[in-house]
Amino acid sequence: MKQNKESETGSLLRPLKTIGFVLKKPQTLRYPFEPKEPAPRYRGFHLNDWEKCTGCGNCAEICPNQAINMVEIAEIQPKPGMKNERPQLDYGRCCFCGLCVDICPAGSLRLSRDYFHIHFDPKTFVFVPQDEKTDHEHFYPIEQYSIFKASLTHRRQDYEGFSPDLDFALFDPQRVPMKEVEPDKRVLSFVEQVLGYDREEARAEASRCLECKLCEEACPAHMKISDYIKAIYEDQPAEALRQIFEDNPIPSICGRVCMKHCEKACSLSIRGEPLAIRWLKRFVADSITDYQVALGQKTAEPSGKEVAVIGAGPSGLSVAYFLSLKGHKVVVFDSLPGGGGTLRVGPPLYRLPLEAIDKDVDYIASLGVEFRFNTTVGKDVLFEDILKSYDAVFVGVGTRVSRSTRVTNSDRAYLALPFLEQNKLGKPVKVGKEVIVIGGGNVAMDVARVALRLQHIQYPNEAVVTKVVSLEDWDEMPASKEEIEDAKAEGIQFNPGWGPKEIKVADGEVRGLLCMKVKAVFDEAGRFNPTFYEDELMFLEGDMVIEAIGQRADFSFIPQQILEKLEFTAWGKVKVDENGMTTIPGIFAGGDIVNVNLDAVTAIADAKVAAEGIDKWLRRKTT
Amino acid sequence: MNGTSGNKTSGSSRELELYFGPQHLGMVGNFSITLKVEGDRILEARANPGFLHRGFEKLMEYRTWIQNFPMVCRINVIESGSMEMIYSMAVESLAQIEVPERAHYVRSIYLELCRVSSHLFGLWAYSNMLGFDTVAQWAMYHRDLILDLLEELTGGRVYNIFIWPGGVRRDFPKGFEDRIVETLHTIGSCVPDYNTAFFDNRIFYERSKGIGKITQQEAKELGATGQTLRATGLKFDIRKVAPYAAYDKVEWDVPVREDGDAYSRILVIRDEMIESVHMIFKLLEAMPQGPVYNRIPNPFKWKIPPGDTYVRCESSRGELGLYLVSDGGERPYRVHFRTPSYTNGLILLEKLLQGASIADVGNIMISLYVVAPEIDR
């Protein structure tokens, strides 16, 4: 009774207290006449920005209720890094937990504050969400919106609720940092700049992969990226190597210099850093000392056929690998003293050491491929003889002749490829103290950074400078961003937006480069056609000029009567069919002379096609 | 049958089996009791759970660690917070995930808001069942104000899906602290009204005093926790006994009563609400700045090292436990919940109903704070 004192002392007048409530306003909302606004974070129906959505399917993967299906949308054109699929919601299953929002790498999927859908037809509850950007029909501004009509097809504009937040995302937007040699140290020698991941770092980086496989579609060679990344995560590098070798026999090379189309497509790259796919491939190649032991590959029964491959670059090496697995005898001709082709003499040692190339080449040789190095086709052995003595020929000679600007005194300038080649073959050019590099592509970056290193080696403790002049401005420079950043960090000076006019020579010595301001690099049709302000000039002082403005193929080894039959595309590339065969039966081609990407992985993709084609060709002839 | 008065043996015509089922007025939730009555006295009661069996523990074995997180809150419809908390605690202990300091505070504040909303819901059920409709409507309205807060914080009103392994899902929105304080003051200012109309009301007092009485000894033996145990005078609260989140960071007290009856239990609930509100104010004062989430591993590749763990926390109904086993895979190997309503609703209820009057069945059941979905899972 003690606790209940008040009830004992209550008086008869107490109920009168309730009269006060008569004056109070009712708390009940007269819904729907009085609206109740959902909170700004409300988890209602989905919104999906179709332009941002990549169709990666991570939302469907994480959904605990399997409420999301990916459906093909006919009006969307798929492209690298974007599928034509979009999520379809089943609101009979959805529990509005929002995990799909937190996993969406693109940040395109959001939840709105709409929560009404009333319909007689249950099929309308299965719904492909869009937002007001692409759906102009079903989203209404507030003055036209009515709660009485509210449904999935009558929704409010600007009514976003639960939204993606990178700090709370279920994926990790940050990549495991790669250890590198500091810029001030690395410019003093040709030491490899990137040190590579160790086992733990590689596993941590591999764990970021969401397995959406957008990268695999973007990769020209369609490598099984998500599988080998998973094998790395599961600490099985040998399994990862097996997956890699299905499509790419030169992982040690590609792990260093690949143009990584995959990373550009990686869904993590949209709001964060892409998965370091290239470095992970390199980790696999580097962590396995003996490919043969890890792979245990055996070649097929000898077919008795012989194939000649001209050029030991990425396409030639890959063709040789795929064909020898199929049991064909392959002989590779190359004028250089070792394998790798352009990659042997182009990419500087700080990026691609020779041992890394030889590791891949040696493995391919171990499968029975015969390499004839230091053998120039057209000189040491004639092309027509090769044609006669082999059952099929693959031409993968690449683009090995540097173009020149052909401005006044351009004969005094060095060309990029010979400059790089001499350096890699151990006969470095004597550089000047003030080097000017013309060009804004990756080769120009290589040239500039090699020149800088040579300057430091040849003029220790002296003031040296390397300058880059490019037609393109910062934002349109074709060199990769990483290369530009690395070059900047090493102290290379950039002069973007200037075109060469004349190399100034006085007393027989190069004195510098006269440049004109660029008006536009491309014409209205988007073709490369630079125009200049002739009166806006700049003089760059320098005692050495190197031109790195592009390269082309050299077909002089092919006799004229055969070359005449070879057809070229509008791009000036060798025309091949779906089997990789040129217009001359029995001659196949791939690599830089065929594709416009001009990189190793596309060459491998060409080689895969050509190897299948050659195999078909050889077997068809026998039957 | 030869039924003579005073014969209380089984089969007597004076006995009647009464099915006190899910549709029965006064029964909250999908639950039923089979009563053997003589007159309006209950001779024996048998609880029948199973109406809400959804197989959560088994379902969880088929879902990945992150996919389970939106599901656990559904085990207790009324208070999703502590379910999310216990699952996160278990996963964090198995996977050794650290939680940022601020997240502990956000968790505690959120959990206390959930507790108040749950208690208000309980108050609605109790007062409604006993015919105090006005009080029931107040309680429902005030609960709604808290749901508004939860909606603003989490995006959901009932299934908040907010506490997840590694911290919480979002930080406080701008100005949220002020709105918590404002709402809690609104509710707090009505406590005298609640007292007058309900807790100190003579009718309610007479109706619940001495009903469903249990001694401390019995409560302990039968595994009662929460208000049922605290109403017998024992200061037992997991938040004090084994503090988690930020409960050891601020000063607060465990309210107790001595009598062990329905009236004491509801007073403990009232005092607990008031204590929770004070605790929220203190937590808001002490809350540090900083992150509220430590990123968990990629959910598609997330494997938790083999091991098992038992964690417990104080839900609004008592001790909530979770036994979680991992075999090193992407999914739990075994999940088992220890829910407070299980002991209260099955064991204690059957005992307390013996000898009670039919009119008190609902009274006793609700005072034991049984929530049927927790029993079935």
Image (cartoon, coloured by chain):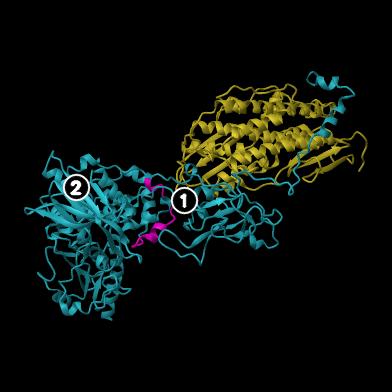
Which residue occupies 48% across, 45% down? A169
Q: Which residues are magenta?
A: A205-222
Residue behind mark 2: A466
**Is disc 2 surrounded by few (<14), some (14 to 19) or many (20+) residues within 10 Å?**
many
Instruction: Find residue A150 and report its horizontal and vertical position in percent.
Output: 67, 55
Amino acid type, mark 1:
Pro
**Kind of residue at badge 2:** Thr
Q: Residue at x 82, y 39 (%)?
A: B36
Image location of residue A107, percent across then percent down: 49, 50
Disc number at residue A105?
1
Q: Which residue of the protein is positioned furthest toward the top in this rendering? A: A2
Q: Chain of mark 2?
A: A
The hue in which chain B appears in the rendered picture of the protein: yellow
Work out which quarter of the rendered image holds the C terminus of chain A and state it.
Answer: bottom left
* Position of residue B335 in the picture relative to residue A330 (left or right): right
Q: Residue furthest bottom?
A: A623
Query: Color of chain A here?
Result: cyan
